[in-house]
Each structure stands twice: as C-alpha cells, then as structure tokens.
Image (cartoon, rainbow, N blue to C red):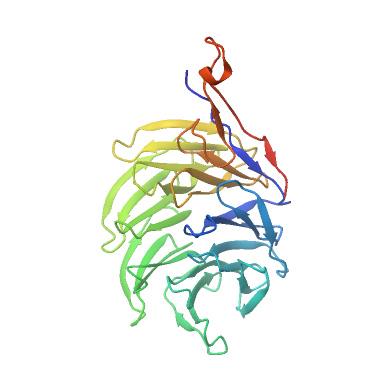
Amino acid sequence: MAMRQTPLTCSGHTRPVVDLAFSGITPYGYFLISACKDGKPMLRQGDTGDWIGTFLGHKGAVWGATLNSDATKAATAAADFTAKVWDAVSGDEVLTLAHKHIVKTVTFTQDSNCLLTGGNDKLLRIYDLSSPDTAPQEIAGHTSAIKKALWCNDDKQILSAAEDKTIRLWDRNSTEVVKTLTFDASVSSMEYMADGEILVITYGKTIAFYNALSLDLIKAVEAPAPISSASLHPEKDFFVAGGEDFKLYKFDYSTKEELESYKGHFGPVHCVRFSPDGELYASGSEDGTLRLWQTAVGKTYGLWKCVLPEDLGTENSEQLYTVPPEIKA
C-alpha cells in the first residue's frame, strides 16, 4: 500500500513565510533559516524543524534569508532598508548594511567573505565583510526591483532576476552583463545548483532549467497552477514546486512527468527547497508555517519513523509510520 505523505509543520511565525534556505551539511547536521513578513527570521535544525533561535533586530518584513555553507553566519534582507549579517551560533547581530530602499535578496560567497544584495533600488551590491566600512561595489542595469541575486561559476559571476522580466548574468570583476534572458512574465524564483551549473527558474506556470554559464534552455515544464518556487533534487532525480493553489508538486526530472502532488498548506506556497542531503524538502507559505516533506515517503529519517507490518505483529495491518503532528517554536 502506498504510504501517505505526512509533513512536519513548523509553526512560530505570525505572518507569511516568503523565503527559506538550507545550510550545507556540517558536523552538527544541517540547518534551515526562514524569512517572514513578521520581521523575525528563524533558525531551525534542518532535518527535524526544531526551533533553535530567532534573529531579532529588523524593523520591517524580512524578504530574504540565507546561511553560509557551514551555518556559522546568517544574512537577512528586509523592508527596513537594511541587510543584516548575524552570528548564526550565538544569534548576535554582526553588521547592519544600510540601503536606499527595501532589500529583497542576500547571498554569501563560498568563502563567506562577501555578501551580495539586491532589492527595490534596482542595484546589486557586493559588500566585503572583512572591511564593512568600505563602500560596496555597485552594479546597475536592471530597470525595476531585483527579486533574487545569486553567485555562480565559483563566485566569478552573478545571476540576478528582476521585476523587469529579465534574468541577467554578470561578470563580477568587470560588472558587465554577459547575457540577458527576457520572459513574458516576471520571474518568481531562481535556484542555482553548482553541481552541473544548473539554473532553476519559475515564471507563470512554467518551471524552466537553464545552463547557468551559457543561459541555454535545458528543459521546461508546465505546472497545473501558477508557480512561485521550484527546487531540483541534489541528485537531479526529481524536482518539486509550489505556488498559488496551495499544493506541492513533485516531478521526474528526466521525463518531466508529474509524480505526486500534496496539499498541506492553507495558503499559497511562496518558497520550496530541497535539503542538502536530498532527504526532504521544505516549503514556506502565506499561512505562516514551514512544512517539511519526505522525498521518499515512509523512510525512517529525522522525526519520521517507519513502522512495518511485521513490527506490529499483525499480518493484515496497513503500513504505518508515525510522526509528531506539529513542532511548536
């Protein structure tokens, strides 16, 4: 019998969850940060969703959040015209980086020494975190608000998506545009996979995969509803997507076939990401919750425990597995 997907629900936020990001795998496991319009980004243990702490200091909605690979630093982008860098171990604020408008996106270089930001003032900024008093390098070119910006190609290039319906690839040193992609709708999300140099983007009902270096299209899939976010499994077997119909969709990456869909949220899904080990994916929603979903339903992992019929001592029992229904922050 097919087992039923039972997501873990992570509560604690009081407004819509608009962004989330995982760290890499560390000696202490991996971690998950969430950005929320309540202005209080939260850090959680990635495999269980257990609340670790809340970063307090922003005075407006937080639109973007990220962790560096070893989860020692966090960065957040907010409506209070600042980006902040935090010590992710102690929770202390390390830096406040003033901007001229709402900040939407933040991302560290691989060595954690530089922070890339973007937002409503249409500029990309690169901050050298070792000398924060130095003015950031600014890159202009977008004609409307920047929604997402990412490092790629070993941090030698930058990818940015904006409300101007373009994605642009920039050379970090010259700050020149290498290539521009134009769409018929605003790009709603962007994910970069260094392994294979794959760019995952969503716009309208489309989930598209591009080569991140050439920006050549690899493949595209139409989903049943408008999609806000998509994520490719680390081994590139599957991808998941969520959007306006409250559902999470899982597709086969090779065949583009829809494998499953799940409804667990009570509002549109704003963000979805696979964990670094690929065992689960997290979603954040307008309903104010994060949910963790198993990639392989029924596997014993994290807080999910698989109970097989022989373990129950009855031959006719359906396959079961137990999970705590809700995690309170």
Q: Is residue 257 above or below residue 231?
A: above
Name the one closer to the observer, 20 or 287. 20
Name the one closer to the observer, 242 or 87. 87
Q: Is residue 256 above or below residue 60?
A: above
Confirm whether residue 186 shows in the render: no
Q: Is residue 32 above or below residue 327?
A: below
Q: Quadrant of residue 214?
A: bottom left
Identity of the residue drawn at 52% across and 56% down: 22
Q: Residue furthest bottom?
A: 134
Q: Position of residue 119 (x, y in %)?
A: 54, 69
Q: Position of residue 37 (x, y in %)?
A: 68, 57
Q: Position of residue 237 (x, y in %)?
A: 34, 41
Q: How many marks?
A: 0
Identity of the residue drawn at 63% across and 77% down: 94
Identity of the residue drawn at 53% across and 90% down: 134
Identity of the residue drawn at 39% across and 32% down: 258
Name the one closer to the observer, 74 or 167. 74
Q: Is residue 58 left or right of residue 194?
A: right
Q: Quadrant of residue 324?
A: top right
Q: Position of residue 167 (x, y in %)?
A: 39, 62
